[in-house]
Amino acid sequence: MAKWFDRLRGGQSRASGETKMAGAQTLFTLSPLGLGAGPRKGFAALAGEGFGRNAVVYRCVRMVAENAARVPLEVRDGENVLTEHPLLSLLARPNRRQDGKALLERVFIYLQLAGNAYLDAAIVDGAVKGVFGLRPDRMAVIAGRDGWPIGYAYTAGGKTQRLMLDTEPVPRVLHLSLFDPLDDHYGMAPLSAAQASLETHNAATSWNRALLENAARPSGALVYNAAAGNLSEEQYQRLKTELEQGFTGALNAGRPMVLEGGLDWKSIALTPRDMDFLEAKSAAAREIALAFGVPPMLLGIPGDNTYANYAEASRALWRQTVIPLVTSVCAALTHWLSPAFDGVELVPDFDVIEALAADRAMDWQRVGSADFLTDDEKREMLGFGKNR
């Protein structure tokens, strides 16, 4: 190794993220991370850091959206289930690029990542001929004098299009949102509520990777104890560059460091064991799953024994998360599209979901054993309507 430490003389300087002190001079800190808690982030940042970089978020969002999108939808006119209806055809093929399942999956994903989802109706000659999904980060509410939305501004490719709500037979845009107590127009996403846990989980992953790339050594400080003054700016920068090139990264793992000229290495960081690294990462993962309403057992997160088995956890996912989400979206679609389709109702059919078969069997047994009910009352309670 070159005797770069023979040049240690001179002044004092400061660099971003580095400390130089007179006397016992700390040259700089070698640390794998420089992360801290940041402000609340928008959709683009959260989607990139969460859905794009975090496996727990990605799996939670996909699990909820895929299950919700595969629930069959029925069109009902009162108690009658219509097997053929223009609304069924529209939902089966809402546009040329997507089928109904793909469009609804997009809606459920945007609701979880942004707290908002938008559908645009293609209205031709007073009839709804198609439905398209719009990105929530490109939409902005156009408020009227009373503060309520009268339209939306959609910006893409540097151009802004105004989508007004005074169209017939239905408003052109359907805005679905999750409740936000601090916003009159936009919703709050589960990912936003889990931002701190997301940042903790990502930081733990980056920390682990950085430790592996640096031979699993903790960070520390190189301290200059020479009595002849501090380093000059040129000496400081040269030493910093040579250290970073010679002793960081996977290729330099385990390389010994020779210290001369009054230099001393001081370890200043806690080890992963001191930080309870694995448990902190698992706790962050459980909090992320909690925000999305996904039982941690379904994600393979260790240390969670809330449910007796996988089947029970799967039923909890459906009962507590998927069913309420699908029901609310179907109610919004009915309110939006019903005026253009003879006032029919769009209803989810959960009877065909295998994960709910045990619950359905219990309902059948309970209602069937109720001798004080008539057959018509039993059929109505089970969702079949009266016997004709």
Image (cartoon, helix red, strand yellow):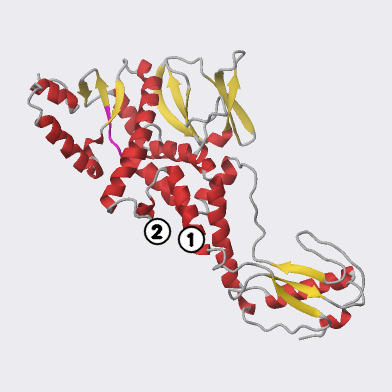
Return the residue at label 2: 303
- Callout 1: few (<14), some (14-19), or many (20+) C-alpha neighbours within 10 Å? few
Separation of residues labelled 1 and 2 (CA atoms): 9 Å
* Residue 150 visible in the current orientation: yes
Return the residue at label 1: 279
The answer to whether marks 1 and 2 mark residues whose Cβ atoms lie closer than 8 Å is yes
* Residue 69 visible in the current orientation: no
Can you give x and y, in whole percent of width and height, for residue 190 in the image? 48, 40
User: Is 47 situated left or right of 324 in this image?
Assistant: right
Quadrant hosting residue 66: top left
**Residue that protrudes farthest toward the left in the picture:** 371
User: Is 337 situated left or right of 175 in this image?
Assistant: left
Q: Which residues are magenta?
A: 69-74
Can you give x and y, in whole percent of width and height, for residue 153 in the image? 59, 26
**Residue at image location 69% in from the left, 77% down from the top:** 247
User: Looking at the picture, does residue 337 appear above or below residue 225?
Assistant: above
Three-letter code, disc 1: Glu
Of the image marks 1 and 2, the number of the one nearer the N terminus: 1
Q: Nearer the viewer, residue 199 or 388?
A: 199
Q: Which mark is residue 360?
A: none
